[in-house]
Image (spheres, rainbow, N blue to C red):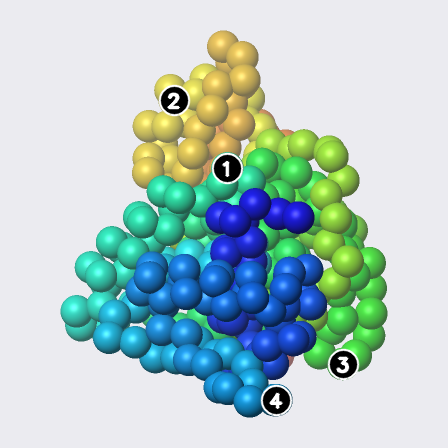
Amino acid sequence: MANTSTRTLRLLSLLQTHRYWPGDELAERLGISIRTLRRDIDRLRELGYPVAAQRGVDGGYQLAAGAALPPLVIDDEEAVALAVGLQAAAQGPVEGIAEASVRVLAKVAQVMPARLRRRVEALRAVTVPADWGAPAGAGVDPDELTLVALACRDSEQLGFAYTAADGRGTERTVEPHRLVCLDRRWYLVAYDLGRHDWRTFRLDRLTAARGTGARFRPRDLPAADAAEFVRAGLTGAPRPHRVEVVVDAPAATVRERIGRWGVVEEVTAGRCRVRMTADSLDWPAMALGALGADFSVVEPPELLELLDDWGTRFTRAARHEPGPRTAGW
């Protein structure tokens, strides 16, 4: 038989999960006699828990409302849900609730076992709050949510089954980037290794998530942040192009000409890698053409098509050759 303290906690947990327990059923669940049950109930009352008793043949017990909130006994999933909810409230717009939420969250985190604290910290580290309503996570399995969060934090490739809006199911393997709470839903922003592009996934349509064990180097997201990326997808706004090229010129020279519009990394003394994001590929094409140096395009393929088209027209202009007339010109 469990010791008295463990049994008392088990009794408290049972009383908190059901509105009413018949005495004999409660005693049977705990593996104790009715007399021992009465003693344990008295012990809970001494600790401040208002346990109401109903006498008679069908007598039983239930936890009643008291003058103060007593300590609660919650399971692992409830603890994670509580911490996530408190984090959302701490970031929410309701006046006066943020400070109290932070205080309660600190208390919960302090007494959490390491395995739960790791899950909660992973969620906090990779979740991007947004301003369109509070997150509800309807239809999202807490285990799936925390598994995805850990994969984001640990830069581990993730596999899962995904159901699109039209009901079509696919298997995906992605490099998870961030979780976003937006418009009362959870979204995963990730680089889809099968589609070779960034994608947004609704977590309530995601099942059978599993870590692959393969680590990856995080890519640069083609947006200011993950929340902006999700918003652009929901509103139908065009997503920025992510441009990467290797330039046959010193990094210092390229930085002077591109300035703050791109990230320049030295490859060798005479070569560098340039990364840019832009809503239109026209500007990167002009900026690269103005460098006065050879370069090779790493991505996207659309930039190669644009350069090929521009190159054809520039060549005709240089040779004074007439080109095809465009209707309306």
Residue closer to the observer: 230 or 71: 71
Q: Residue at x 50, y 55 (%)?
A: 9
Can you give x and y, in whole percent of width and height, for residue 216 in the image?
A: 65, 33
Quadrant of the image occupied by residue 218: top right
- For numbered disc 4, what is the local secondary structure? loop
Q: Residue at x 69, y 67 (%)?
A: 28
Question: In the rendered image, which residue does mark 2 sit on?
Answer: 253
Please state which of the two labelled residues, at mark 1 or mark 3, is closer to the viewer. 1
Quadrant of the image occupied by residue 152: top right
Q: Residue furthest front?
A: 35
Q: Could you tell which of marks 4 and 1 lies nearer the N-terminus?
A: 4
Residue closer to the observer: 324 or 84: 84
Label at residue 57: 4
Cβ–Cβ under 8 Å for marks 1 and 3: no
Question: In the rendered image, which residue does mark 1 sit on?
Answer: 114
Cβ–Cβ under 8 Å for marks 2 and 3: no
Question: In the rendered image, which residue does mark 3 sit on?
Answer: 166
Q: Residue furthest top?
A: 269
> Is residue 76 in sight in this rendering?
yes
Cβ–Cβ under 8 Å for marks 4 and 3: no
Q: Could you tell which of marks 1 and 3 lies nearer the N-terminus?
A: 1
Residue closer to the observer: 27 or 175: 27
- For numbered disc 2, what is the local secondary structure? helix
Q: Residues within 10 Å of mark 4 (few under 14, many from 20)?
A: few
Q: Marks 4/1: CA distance? A: 45 Å
Query: Is 181 left, or right, of 212 in this rendering?
Result: left
